[in-house]
Amino acid sequence: MQSLYGAIANYKLYYMEKNKSKGLGDTVAKITKATGIKKVVEKVSKAVGKDCGCAKRQDTLNRLFPYNN
């Protein structure tokens, strides 16, 4: 059973490291996804037929406000 717990712990560490925010843009993206704002924006964007610009905004915020890890 110990090896199962070790495997789960290793996976959690890998997942957390892989999904670490590079900057403010990543953090904002995670917050909007967790609160459901992202889904609403995607639906409105699809209905209007215009790109929301979220990815570009995320990249810009990451460049302007990087996290120095």
Image (spheres, helix red, strand yellow):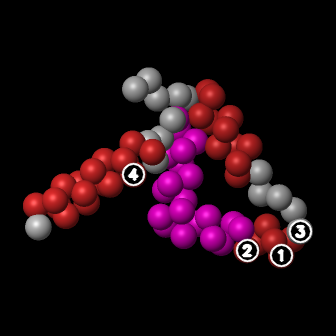
Pointer 2: what residue? Answer: 43
Pick whichever of labels 4 and 1 is earlier in the sequence: 4
What whole-number distance in Å separates the C-alpha atoms at marks 4 and 1? 34 Å
Q: Nearer the viewer, residue 11 or 63?
A: 11
> For numbered disc 1, what is the local secondary structure?
helix
Instruction: Determine contact: label 3, label 1, CB under 8 Å.
Output: yes
Q: Amino acid at mark 4?
A: Tyr
Check residue 49 in the rendering and tell me which mark sits there, or answer none. 3
Q: Which residues are magenta?
A: 23-42
Neighbor class of circle 3 (other Cα within 10 Å; few <14, some 14-19, many 20+) is few
Which residue does the numbered mark 4 point to in the structure image? 15
Q: Quadrant of residue 3?
A: bottom left
Q: Secondary structure at mark 2?
A: helix
Classify the position of the N terminus by image quarter: bottom left
Q: Confirm or deny contact between disc 3 and disc 2 (CB under 8 A).
A: no
Q: Mark 4 touching mark 2, by CB under 8 A?
A: no
Of residues 62 and 37, the one drawn nearer to the viewer in this rendering: 62
**Marks 4 and 2, Cα distance to the nearest angstrom?**
28 Å
Spatial CA distance of label 3 from label 1 is 5 Å
**Residue, disc 1:** 47
Mark 2 neighbour density, 10 Å: few (under 14) some (14–19) many (20 or more)? few
